[in-house]
Image (spheres, rainbow, N blue to C red):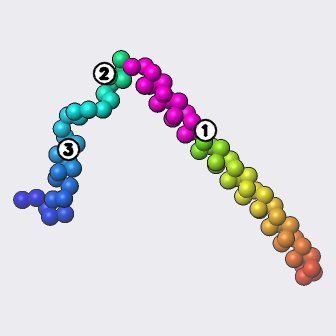
Amino acid sequence: MIDPHVQPLVPALALLLQEPATGFTAETVGARPEVVERGLFFLNLAYTTVWIILALYIATLSIRLRRLSRQVARLKERAGL
């Protein structure tokens, strides 16, 4: 008897066990290097985009932190601390 919580997953698992009818396999991609080249181009583009966004985010945080530390210093100066 199959666990009732696993029952909805059975069709999906059956599909995973079947051989793929279409799509890219190692044999078809090996015969078409332009497909691999295009895929690597998009992978490189996505990788570069993520790093640029991360660098911009860190730069923005640095600027905001610098402004905040100046405000804290001014408040301490006004309070006489």
- Percent position (x, y) of residue 36? 44, 25
Residue at image point 33% right, 29% down: 24
CB of mark 3 within 8 Å of CB of mark 2? no
Residue 27, numbered circle: 2
Q: In the visual, does 78 lie left or right of 23?
A: right
Q: In the visual, does 8 lie left or right of 77?
A: left
Q: Say which element carries label 2.
A: helix
- Distance between the Cα atoms at labels 3 and 1? 35 Å
In terms of sequence position, does the residue under pointer 2 or pointer 1 come before the other? 2
Q: Main secondary structure of the magenta part?
A: helix
Which quadrant, please, contains the C terminus?
bottom right
Of the pair 55 and 77, the residue shown nearer to us: 55
Q: Say which element carries label 1.
A: helix
Quickly name the residue at label 3: 15
Q: In the visual, does 4 lie left or right of 77?
A: left
- Percent position (x, y) of residue 33? 43, 19
Residue at image point 26% right, 32% down: 22
Mark 2: give few (<14), some (14-19) or many (20+) Cα within 10 Å: few
- Percent position (x, y) of residue 42? 51, 34
Residue 26, numbered circle: none
Question: Quick one: which residue is furthest to the top in this view?
Answer: 31
Q: Say which element carries label 3.
A: helix
- Distance between the Cα atoms at labels 3 and 2? 21 Å
Residue at image point 57% right, 36% down: 45
Which quadrant, please, contains the N terminus?
bottom left
Residue type at mark 1: give it.
Thr
Quickly name the residue at label 1: 48
The stretch in magenta equals 32-47
In terms of sequence position, does the residue under pointer 3 or pointer 1 come before the other? 3
Would you say residue 44 sits in the magenta stretch? yes
Would you say residue 70 sits in the magenta stretch? no
- Percent position (x, y) of residue 46? 55, 40
